[in-house]
Image (spheres, helix red, strand yellow):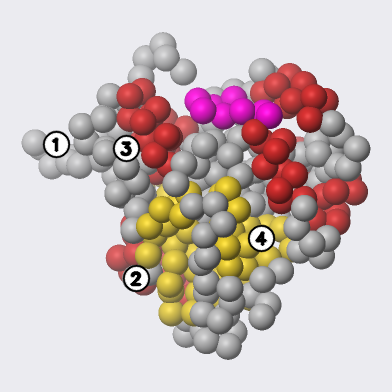
Amino acid sequence: MTAKVDGFLDPTTNSISYVVSDPETTRAAIIDPVLDFDPEAGRTTTGSADKLVAAVESGGLHLEWILETHVHADHLSAAQYLRERLGGRTAIGTGVVEVQKTFGALFNVEREVAADGSQFDRLLADGEAVSIGSIAGRVLSTPGHTPACSCYVFGDAAFVGDTLFMPDSGTARADFPGASAGKLYDSLQRILALPPETRLFMCHDYGAGGQREIAWESTVAEQRRSNIHCRDGISRESFMATRQARDAELPVPRLMVPAVQVNIRGGRLPPPERNGTAYLKVPINVL
């Protein structure tokens, strides 16, 4: 069976969320949903997530999964909001435990955020089966950008998160805590070993620095032919050198501090304090 894929761009974070459905059974999954956040006002809104709600409801779909490809550093997750609105189970790769340990210590919230993945309904291991209606799928563990990165393969469609970008934009950075350019290269080879016609769906696109329209779908064949960082013929050593040099020039993502605190909680805000208000922490002189 071929999955129906609808992508939804959040232009503020250049993130793409997906509603993936089985036309035969009307079962569906949402992948990488965005909770809108205004960092100046410290305010969340649900405009981006409500577009996903509308797509599910207007299509008569039944939501089975809310899948995260990793713990995002560039947007807050709307997983819990969608779970409350639409049902479904939240899931992420088993590597989330390592991310929770690292960032729980960074933000000094180890007692609030158990590093066991219990904030999600299910942790998914490499090779584990996950289906949408009659469409069989599986989890492909792809660490490197973060330890929790996973690619979800449903039929001829694969959702690669931040691991891979459009061919003219290369690949994800590999300089976060627990990241590894070498592991990223190895993970890319797993994705590029999928059948050439496999449709690949990105989590982000920046229009090649404004040189073209935003796009988020390519194929394994296109990536192997022309990806600027990992096309056929580029060695592991060459990739690592290019990736590490590029990462040394990149700033901390604009929403990393609030995003990671929410996302290690499975898309939940920190608990309210005595005055009824929730607060996000900013570590000083650390990042």
Is 278 on the left or on the right of 41, as rendered?
Answer: left
Does residue 7 sit above or below 244 in this rendering? below
Three-letter code for the amino acid on which mark 3 is drawn? Ala
Mark 1 or mark 3, which has the lower sequence index?
Answer: 3
Position of residue 121 measured from the top left corner of the image (x, y, whole percent): 34, 58
- SS at badge 2: loop
- Which type of secondary structure does the marked residue at label 3 adopt? loop
Q: Is residue 18 magenta?
A: no
Label 3 CA crowd tier, 10 Å (few <14, some 14–19, many 20+): many
In three-dimensional space, the C-alpha distance between marks 4 and 1, rounded to whole angstroms, equals 41 Å
Which residue is under mark 1? 273
User: In the image, what residue type sits under mark 1?
Assistant: Glu
Question: Disc 2 marks which residue?
Answer: 87
Residue 218 position within the rendered picture, expressed as x and y whole percent measured from the top left: 78, 57
- The residues bearing labels 3 and 2 have C-alpha atoms spaced at a distance of 24 Å
Q: For the residues carrying marks 4 and 2, which lies nearer the camera in this image?
A: 4
Question: In the rendered image, which residue does mark 4 sit on?
Answer: 158
Which residue sits at x=84%, y=38%? 228
User: For the magenta stretch, what is the residue range?
Assistant: 175-182
Q: Looking at the image, tell me whether mark 4 or mark 1 is earlier in sequence order.
A: 4
Label 4 crowd bin: few (<14), some (14–19), many (20+), radius 10 Å = many
- Hey, what amino acid is under mark 4? Ala
